[in-house]
Image: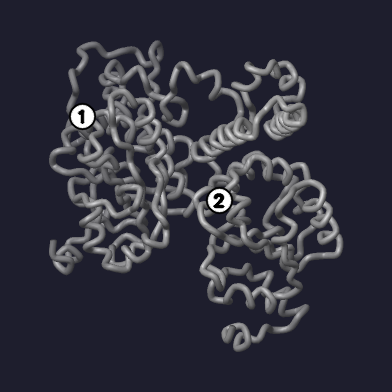
Amino acid sequence: MDPLGARSQFVDIQTLPTWQQQLDEDGEGMPLERSDSLLDLQAFPSPFPFRPDINRKIILFVGEVSLLNCTAIVNTSNESLNDKNPVSDAIHQLAGPELRDELLKLKGCRTGEAKLTKGFNLAARFIIHTVGPKYKTKYRTAAESSLYSCYRNIMQLAAEQSMASVGLCVVTTTKRGYPLEDSTHIALRTVRRFLENHGNSLEAVVFSVTDTEEPVFKRLLPLYYPRSEEEERTFLPLIPTDIGNSEGEPVVPERQIRIAEKPGTLEDEAEEDGLESDLGQVGNHAFARMEGDVDKQRKMILQGQLSEAAIQKQHQRNYNRWLCRARAEDLSDIAALKALYQTGVDMYGRTVMVLVGRNIPVTLIDLEKALLYFIHVMDHITVKEYVMVYFHTLTGEHNHLRSDFLKSLYEIVDAKFKKNLKAFYFVHPSFRSKVSTWFFTTFTVSGVKEKVRYLDNLQQLFTCIRPEQIDIPPFVLEYDTRVNGPYQLSQSSNL
């Protein structure tokens, strides 16, 4: 592909017909084995009813996803983000060498995850990179769940970043062996459910397909996106019996009971150790149940009933439950607070995460969702060394997280969170916050106290992190200038 020639062929998605507009073109779609009987929708309501508002957001485009002029396009790759496949090759060729350099900084991507980079020389502003599963018949259930996670995390990332449009390629590459028709069912229903539940901000979703993939998509689209009530009735008998849960996620029958419980519980251990009744008495709140489990575990450790390896296995299984839910749940309301975000790197090249105390309305938000969001954002960050900057600036009583919440968070998170945290910079602390933090890190949690650094002004912060490497909220800058005077950029830049 000639990059210059291809750039002249960039496609503005606004010029493409929507799925709803294609009704006049295609008639009633291309049936699989069209049913002759039209079911009564009142007696047999469709799980995917006619929604013209959603259909107007859907575009089926035959062509390369790299050519789409939209907010973000999707790249399908491998765990090292260096896969050689037609979609990825075309994106790299048009985006330029800067993309490869940027991908090296991401340190890979796990199957089912989605990671974001700039689009560089593409018409799209961003690229969302994801890794589809390798398909084997005996591991079909795991492959379905992973593929669902790919599409769900793509859509979640697009919503969190307030993207207007996203161009989707077929995530499963030929070398990964996923049957095209099976993967198309998962893609179409996952996107449909996301648009139903969380897609208000998204204006367009483009399914970019090849000539080979187009017939499959055109056959299956009417099942999930019927363009009239007649089309809905016609294709209702052809919808698969397995359509997942309310988010489109595959449901494994033998694990339904376990999934129905909130994460943070230890169902397996409760059955094995007779703890079920005790847990039920603690209450349904996930934090309370988690703390009950932790206390029980500690008691059993003291009594020598649980080995260290068993405890670690329990903890990892528990964290994985939280992580799975964090990836599946709509957390856009928590993301909108802008209380936790990634910025640049410190003087040692370690990732910097920022926590803004004043942006946490503790009394108004669902703290369980806040914990899920923390896990969702931090899981891939914490695989390598990182530092956190907490701006305590101008916080009030309604911004202060309770110690029981922080204790629960500390007990739930993976070991890598604690191991790879190298510094916690506490900016603009009050005397009371210093005392509270000292008590908490001394008597409640271990291994954190020596990592906390209290910084009274931004000048001290800039000796650790250069000003250009951290996004600081304007109110923090204004406060620091008013109280401490303007910082001396020349001094910090010489370090």
Q: Residue at x 24, y 56 (%)?
A: 66
Answer yes or no: is residue 5 visible: yes
Q: Secondary structure at mark 1?
A: helix
Q: Is residue 401 left or right of residue 177?
A: right
Q: Residue at x 69, y 64 (%)?
A: 391
Which of 447 and 36 lies nearest the eye of the viewer? 447
User: Mark 1 sits on what residue?
Assistant: 219
| Rendered image: mark on residue 378 | 2
Q: Residue at x 69, y 15 (%)?
A: 274
Q: Quadrant of the N terminus?
A: bottom left
Q: Taking 460 as reference, is 397 above or below it? A: above
Q: Secondary structure at mark 2?
A: helix
Q: Is residue 239 left or right of residue 265?
A: left
Q: Taking 415 as reference, is 425 above or below it? A: below
Q: Quadrant of the C terminus?
A: bottom right
What x and y, as percent, mark residue 234?
A: 26, 19
Q: Is residue 125 left or right of residue 160?
A: left
Give the tally of numbered discs: 2
- Sequence-wise first label, 2 or 1: 1
Q: Find out whether the residues at labels 2 and 1 contact each other: C-beta distance under 8 Å.
A: no
